[in-house]
Amino acid sequence: MKIGIFGGAFNPVHNGHIQLMRSYLDELELDRLILVPTANPPHKTGAYLVSEDDRINMLKLLVSIDKRIEVSDIEFRRQGKSYTYLTLKELKEEYPDDELYLIIGSDQYLSFNSWYMPDEILKIATVCTMARTQPDVEKLYEYRRENANMKDTVICEFDIFEASSTDIRRRIKEGKSVSHLVPEAVENYIREHRLYV
């Protein structure tokens, strides 16, 4: 089985994420896509995040959109900083016979070799990213050429819906509509639980 691992703050999850998820599911011919909300990312402080339960609950609403999508609280169960290597190692123990595909953003891809245990990550999973623009495409391919350990990584090219969690949080705080930016079920959840106000 081919399993994609898609991490992020998902604060909140939005239509851009959903389009990206579907694109990766189809492009990589994945059987499943596991969403892993980040608990305590090493490069960010967690002050801006809503609760773990709220982010998990919003993500679980996506399962009704596509049955191949699952949600994991694996990073919330671990103490300390949430390094991708530790998450993947644990998931590989859970799915020893499956092929894992780690989906990361293009900025993360271009700094991948500064991550914690990058070569060990590459032994566990195929790293995948996508480019939004032609200059991005060229940068990504150049990085892959210059780093021998990245030769088996996958670079996809999608047209995706542009949305930003930061912008969505700002719009909610200002009392503006976000109905065109998040699924209706997520918008209802945000309103009912008074998130980001």
Image: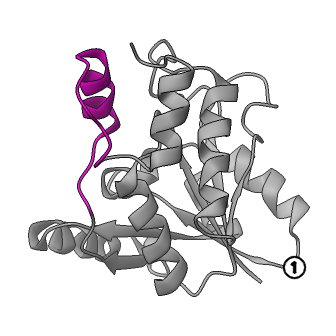
- Residue 149 visible? The answer is no
- Residue 44 visible? The answer is yes
The image quarter containing residue 189 is top right
Looking at the image, residue 55 lies above or below residue 69: above
Quarter containing the N terminus: bottom right
**What residue is drawn where x is 44% and y is 45%?**
114
**What residue is drawn where x is 31% and y is 47%?**
181
| Residue range corresponding to the magenta coloring | 161-180
Say which of 176 and 48 sits in front: 176
Residue occupied by mark 1? 97
- Left or right: residue 64 compared with residue 155: right
- Left or right: residue 176 compared with residue 71: left
**What residue is drawn where x is 61% and y is 69%?**
66
Q: What's the amino acid at mark 1?
A: Asp
Looking at the image, residue 92 lies above or below residue 87: below
Question: In x, y percent, where is residue 28?
Answer: 53, 84
Say which of 85 and 77 sits in front: 77
